[in-house]
Image (cartoon, rainbow, N blue to C red):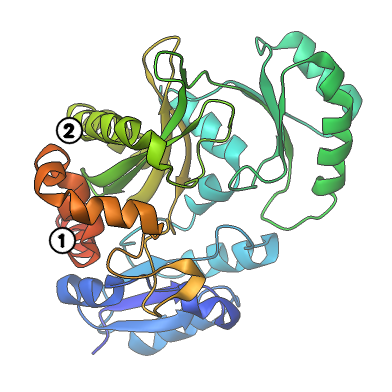
Amino acid sequence: MYRVIAANRGPQKAPKNWRIFERESMEKHFGKVLDVNGEDGFSVLESYEKYKDSVEFIRWYPCPETCNMDEYNGILSQDSKINLPYITNSAEGFKSVQSKEVCFQKWKDSDVNCPDFFTFNTKDEFYENLSKSKIKLPFLIRVNNSVGGRETYIIKDDSEIENALNQTISHNQNRVGIDRKMMCVQFVNTIDKDRNVNVSYRIHVSGNKVISGYGRVVPKDNWCAITAGSFQKEQVDNWVYYNVLCEKFMREKEGEIVKAVHSLNLNHQGVDLVVDEDTNELCFLEVQPTYASGYPQVGWCGYHPPYYNPSDPNLVSFLRQNESVLEKNIPMYYHNWLDKQNHFNLVYKYLKEYVRA
């Protein structure tokens, strides 16, 4: 009998519904899983009615980049009729994943540190809101659901505003997403001047636990350190330094990081955060329920064993050659992240403890 309804992305996105070792880990801890199209507005409810005598949980997993308002309303409508606790993330909380302004506002309401921001619909509204805000140069102009720095412009001088507004307004006309909006976001200083690099972190949270994470180091002239970037051999000392630092605050700041996830009605996320070099505080940027960890198809989307993610040959070679030393300094990275089987076993082990508490 089925124990979990997996309300997945639609059929055309099916290859990314289950990451490497994920499904078997969920079934190990929660029982047999039924895959259902979670975006068509009816299949989840139909499956629930059919199997409600045995199913105990639901796992909502819509596409964070392309789920639109009609699909999202279909998710909410079905969820309101289904009396099942969610394993990973609530249907309502998913809006915080795609809409950055919703995420930021909830964080501010919960005293979770994140950048200042405002939304706008026109150029006039942008300039009016900017004059009223505390936001100063440099800042970002962007749409609210872009990822990886796409459709995002950094403004370092007033002369750059007009072109960025024109480009962003053009992007915003493509209404892909739940509630497409334009935003202005205060840029956070993440440049380590002593080491001449820009740094960000991806931390993985499951239930009440921080599972794993890693630091991402890029040259200081690359403002978009939220992307994985390419491993550069000349940055190897900095990579080690910041991943040791990541290991440290994953342990020391676990409560703060977990709070950032729970305040959005979410249970399992990849959290993007930085350390504000001006205040030395953690600053939270976004959450990623479908964080990249590799997929079962070898080579799919650039992910390859032994680690699937990272896949950069130079970084993989470095990690393998120096394992005996590095695993002692960054054990959560080696044992809880590079080992994807253990990673997802921990994810669903801690989720089981959390949702059954």
Q: Which amino acid type is marked by label 2?
A: Arg
Query: Hey, which residue is sitting farthest front in the picture?
Result: 234
Q: Which amino acid type is marked by label 1?
A: Lys
> Residue 58 sits in which quadrant?
bottom left
Q: Residue at x 43, y 14 (%)?
A: 277
Q: Secondary structure at mark 2?
A: helix
Q: Which residue is mark 2?
A: 251
Q: Which of the pair 259/237 is nearer the observer?
A: 237
Q: Which of the pair 212/207 is nearer the observer?
A: 212
**Label 2 – label 1 distance at C-alpha:** 19 Å
The x and y percentages for residue 357 are 15, 52
Q: Label 2 neighbourhood size at 10 Å, few (<14), some (14-19), many (20+)?
A: some
Looking at the picture, does residue 138 appear above or below residue 225?
above
Q: Which mark is residue 349?
A: 1
Looking at the picture, does residue 334 appear above or below residue 103?
below
The x and y percentages for residue 225 are 51, 35
Mark 2 vs mark 1, foreground winner is 2
Looking at the picture, does residue 156 appear above or below residue 355?
above
